[in-house]
Amino acid sequence: MNILRAIGYRQMPWKNGGGVTTEIAVSPAASSIGDFGWRISMASVASDGPFSCFDGIDRTLTVLSGAGLMLDVDGEAPERLTPTDKPFAFPGDVPTSARLIAGPITDFNVMTRRGRWSHSVEDLRIDGTRSLSVVAGLVVVFCRSGELVLDRSSALAAHDTAFIEASAEVSVAGSGEALVIRLFEIPAG
């Protein structure tokens, strides 16, 4: 298990120059914005506007804080996303824009390169101890709020992240919320 602390995340400008992203992790580690296999990040959004276009990328967005936003993905009905809503998946290469509901928000993004990686994002509330199955791929646990302890030894504070390679099960204890990201590499062929 590898733990990344929120204080060590890298800040970088948005691809479209409209704001700043807090990059939690990217693979391969030295990837640029144009050649990553997967990327996990947070962003503060202070105004309405278009999302950056990422060719060949699948995205999942979760609102962490603020009142929320209306996400307009080309060809779809607008989607209202608030901190209590489930993570929302959409293609990163389709014109997309956001309108803030009532002031700035912070969001959480997972992006994977289509055809090379796939992902899922689950919102998990913890009050006590739960078992988390880690049977294939890479599982990432992002502490959304509160404090969580993985396998009785690795503590996560708000916005800390744990990377867990495939194994049997991991216990998650404490009181808080987590986002559980499952990343799967797609075999070449």
Image: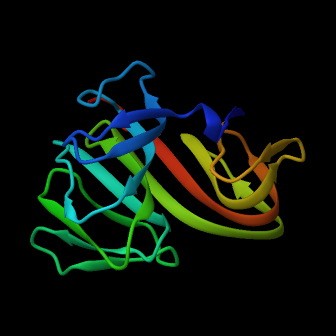
Q: Which quarter shows the N terminus?
A: top right
**Residue drawn where x is 16% and y is 47% of the image:** 53
Residue 89, picture quadrant: bottom left
Q: Position of residue 47 (x, y in %)?
A: 27, 63
Give the farthest residue toward the right: 152
Residue 185's place in the image compared with 70, above or below, is above
Q: Quadrant of residue 146?
A: bottom right
Which residue is most to the top?
30
- Relative to 135, is 172 above or below? below
Question: Residue at 38% of width from left, 72% of height from top?
Answer: 103
- The residue located at (45%, 43%) in the rendering is 40
* Residue 106 against residue 13 in the figure, above or below: below
Please tell me how many numbered marks the rendered image carries: 0
- Residue beneath the point at 28% across and 51% down: 58
Q: Nearer the viewer, residue 123 or 13?
A: 13
Quadrant of the rendered image containing residue 56: top left
Q: Please state, as top left, top right, bottom left or bottom right, where the C terminus lies in the image.
A: top left
**Residue 16 drawn at (x, y percent):** 19, 43
Q: Check the image and report above or below for 34 versus 178.
A: above
Please indicate, yes or no, whether residue 165 appears anywhere in the rendered image.
Answer: no
Residue 20, horizontal then vertical, whole percent: 36, 43
Q: Is residue 82 left or right of residue 175?
A: left
77 or 131: which is nearer to us? 77
Is residue 100 shown left or right of residue 106? left
Question: What sort of colour scheme is used for the picture?
Answer: rainbow
In this rendering, does residue 56 appear at all? yes
Indicate left or right for 26 with 166 as reference.
left
